[in-house]
Amino acid sequence: MKIDIGISEKDRGDIAKGLSRFLADTYTLYLKTHNFHWNVTGPMFQTLHILFMDQYTEAWTAVDLIAERIRALGFPAPGSYKEFAELSSVKDSEGAPKAKDMIRQLIEGQETVVRTARTLFPLAEKAGDQPTLDLLTQRMQIHEKNAWMLRSLLEE
């Protein structure tokens, strides 16, 4: 059945493409954060282990919200590691870096997700897509707060 929510198919498609990149960034950051949760060591172990768990758990919930928004716009959501690798701007990580390097990488990842979200605002605003704008605003607040919390751990 045809979708008639007041947003043209072209605009819905453009927004869905942007949200697919946003989903890939979010999922890649989720996976990286979960990996670091498992592999962190050193004097900040307890603090980072808990912080990383809080952040990856929140991101896990977010990927569902983003994918469901793509579906509500009438397009398939990416869902494979191959698709995520092709779409994501968040840099992958190999191995188990030192704790402070983990923090730096996660700050970069959080900020990358925010920048991706910002690129979608003009499309969603032009189309009058308030649900997507609301989703992006909420996600940006969370990622900016996460980056701030991580940066505070590097202060001397």
Image: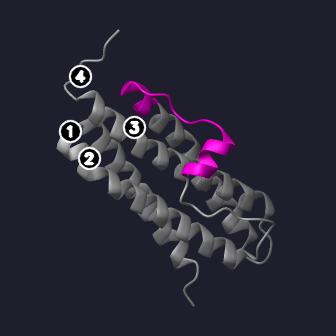
Please tell me which residue is depicted at 52% across the width and 76% down the height of the picture: 151
Please tell me which residue is depicted at 47% across the width and 42% down the height of the picture: 20
The residue carrying mark 4 is: 5
Q: Disc 1 and disc 4: Cα gap in Å? A: 11 Å
Q: Amino acid at mark 4?
A: Ile
Sequence order check, earlier mark of 2 and 4: 4
**CB of mark 4 within 8 Å of CB of mark 3?**
no
152 above or below 82? below
Q: Amino acid at mark 2?
A: Leu
Please, which residue is most extreme toward the top here? 1
The residue carrying mark 2 is: 123
> Of helix, strand and loop, which one carries label 1?
helix
Q: Residues within 10 Å of mark 3 (few under 14, many from 20)?
A: many
Please tell me which residue is depicted at 31% across the width and 13% down the height of the picture: 2
Comparing 3 with 155, the one in front is 3
**CB of mark 2 within 8 Å of CB of mark 4?**
no
The dot on residue 16 is: 3
Q: Disc 2 and disc 3: Cα gap in Å? A: 10 Å
Please, which residue is most extreme toward the bottom here? 156
Identify the main secondary structure in magenta.
helix
Q: Quadrant of residue 99?
A: bottom right
Q: Amino acid at mark 3?
A: Ala
The dot on residue 127 is: 1
Report if residue 71 lies within the magenta region.
yes
**CB of mark 2 within 8 Å of CB of mark 3?**
no
Q: Amino acid at mark 1?
A: Ala
Sequence order check, earlier mark of 1 and 3: 3
Residue 143 percent across, percent down from the top left: 45, 59
Q: Is residue 61 left or right of residue 137?
A: right
Magenta residue span: 68-87
Residue 77 percent across, percent down from the top left: 51, 33
Report if residue 133 lies within the magenta region.
no
